[in-house]
Amino acid sequence: MKYKLEAKNIDVFYGKLKALNNINIGITENAVTALIGPSGCGKSTFLRLFNRMNDYIDSFKLNGDILIDDKNIYEKDVFVDELRKNVGMVFQKPNPFPKSIFENVAYGLKIQGIKDKEFINTRVKDALKQAALWEEVKDDLNKSALALSGGQQQRVCIARALAVEPSIILMDEPTSALDPIATAKVEKLIHTLKEKYTIIIVTHNMQQAARISDYTAFFYMGDLIEFDKTNTIFTNPKMERTENYITGRFG
Amino acid sequence: MNNGYKNRLKDSIFKYIGVFACFIGLILLAILIGNILYDGFNRIDWSFLTSLPSRKAEKAGILTAWSGSLWIIIFTFIIAVPIGISAGVYLEEYNRKNQLTRILEINISNLAGVPSIIYGLLGLEIFVRYSNLGSSVLAGSFTLALLILPIIIVATREALKAVPASIRVASYGLGATKWQTTLYQVLPAASGGILTGVILAISRALGETAPLIVVGALAYVPFTPTGPMDEFTVLPIQIFNWVSRPQHEFSINAAAAIIILLLITFTMNGIAVYFRNKWQKKINW
Ligand SMILES: Nc1ncnc2c1ncn2[C@@H]1O[C@H](COP(=O)(O)OP(=O)(O)OP(=O)(O)O)[C@@H](O)[C@H]1O
Ligand SMILES: [Mg+2]
């Protein structure tokens, strides 16, 4: 079977600290993969490998290969700005730019040098529709994104990522700052998005992982303990550690 | 007497000391301004603003002084603002932290505290003599630009520092380069703070006298500058010249000119405050 993303023999160091230890994993296209595990086990570190956001950390060091469509993205001939057009990211805290909703969503296109107004308008509209936000904001796209509710802001951030039409979306605890209703909306959204995108999501919420993901990876102290279909992980885990964690006995 | 009572007593004593200190400052300022207004207000009319200097106090005006100030400020602005903001952006956004840059940073902060006359001497040597600019508007502007550069650099860095990392990360995450992130996100978000710093720096330059005297600004210039290489005078020097004359009429002129200078400075500070408030209201992280 061919994977959309692959991690091969991954070791990550922050200075002397080894944050990830010999990780091997293959991620399926058009599916949602959840990363779970106790705080500090390396989920965010692992997620950020795929769009090279760890590169900004001075002490960061990586061994191994990260492949996207069979291409190692840490090779010299890969430009990070090109890479990130293909791999979008949504962060834990909604972080819209202090600009209008429209400018937020159009930003990714603007930095690509796209000037065609018609094209930008269509893309912004499509992205907002995909992010299930269009109906709520269509009357006032010039409103500051900061004036929206937290849940709406997070959906602006999702729309912003979608507008450049990536094929992969990374989400780092995208609902942890949201209330249950907003969370439900975003979860529903993730469910529809997987038809077009490959999604990797970090979550601390076991029910959420069970609800929305097709595959689940359980990390513990830098090791990948178990990786399987979500169903299997939650009903019939092979490792005792996994079972203890998902049943809430530790973590 | 229990402890709580003591603490409350200390608290209220300190409060009254604070209020008292504030009042002294305000009252002194009010007396000063009141005095100047009383002396000079009636002297201000159209011909005062549009007349050349003269040996007769009642004929003398401040045309050359305020137009000189205007020339100086415009050129100081053109020189100092791009360099100051660029330097601030470099130090804050691009610069890798190491020993050398730390020394650089400390020195820039120290430069903001160097007495202005030192800048005057530096300007005299570098711009007036070595660069052969003479006692021109340009030499004066370069000197003042040096003087306010540290202020602009520090203000720019502070404003950039206040922009949360999440904004930069979001921009990088969409594939923006460092330059695009700085230009499209970080600088606009910091613009209010930078603008405030620039306006305050420019008002500082407007009030400076010592460095310009050293550079060779004249107290008596019978013409307005027509280009950057002309000789010039500025409002503070004109004021200084008038107050040092024995005749009472001239000190009235000085008071009137002070009112104009204060008016300009207050207006600029007002604009700075306006933009700062507007900016703070708009961005609630
Ligand atoms: N920028 C950094 N510099 C140094 N060490 C870091 C850095 N970021 C993370 N680490 C370390 O790497 C390890 C993994 O951190 P990471 O943020 O990936 O964990 P996480 O699983 O996402 O945790 P959480 O659930 O709390 O978000 C931790 O021990 C952490 O202290
Ligand atoms: Mg994390």
Image: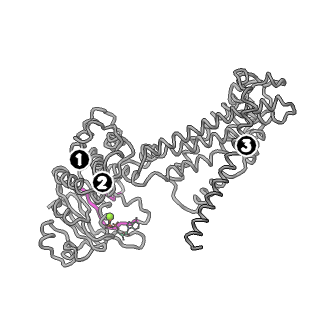
The N terminus of chain B - image quarter: bottom right
What amino acid type is highlighted by mark number 3?
Answer: Gly
Q: Kindly state the secondary structure of the residue where label 1 is placed.
A: loop
Taking the image as four quarters, which one is ligand 2 found in?
A: bottom left
What amino acid type is highlighted by mark number 2?
Answer: Met
Pointers 2 and 3 within a single chain: no
Check residue B123 in the rendering and tell me which mark sits there, or answer none.
3
Q: Which badge, 1 or 2, comes first in the chain's sequence? A: 2
Dot 1: within a 10 Å radius of its alpha carbon, few (fewer than 14), some, or many (20 or more) residues?
A: many
> What residue appears at the point 65 percent right and 51 percent down from the top-left corner?
B22
Viewer can see residue B231 = yes
Q: Position of residue B121 (x, y in %)?
A: 76, 45
> What residue appears at the point 48 percent right and 46 percent down from the top-left corner?
B190
Measured in 3D between alpha carbons, the distance from the residue under mark 2 to the one under mark 3, in whole angstroms, is: 52 Å
Q: Residue furthest bottom?
A: A240
Q: Is residue B77 above or below residue A186?
A: above
Pointers 1 and 2 within a single chain: yes
Q: Position of residue B53 (x, y in %)?
A: 78, 25
Comparing marks 1 and 2, which lies closer to the viewer?
1
What amino acid type is highlighted by mark number 1?
Answer: Ala
Q: Position of residue A175 (x, y in %)?
A: 27, 57
Q: Residue tagged by mark 2? A: A89
Dot 2: within a 10 Å radius of its alpha carbon, few (fewer than 14), some, or many (20 or more) residues?
A: many
Dot 3: within a 10 Å radius of its alpha carbon, few (fewer than 14), some, or many (20 or more) residues?
A: many
Q: Nearer the viewer, residue A163 or B206?
A: B206
Q: Residue tagged by mark 1? A: A131
User: Is residue A71 shown in magenta?
Assistant: yes
Q: Please give the range of residues in magenta.
A: A60-75
> In the rendered structure, the residue with mark 3 lies on which chain?
B
Left or right: A147 with respect to B12? left
User: Is residue B195 shown in magenta?
Assistant: no
Q: Kindly state the secondary structure of the residue where label 3 is placed.
A: helix
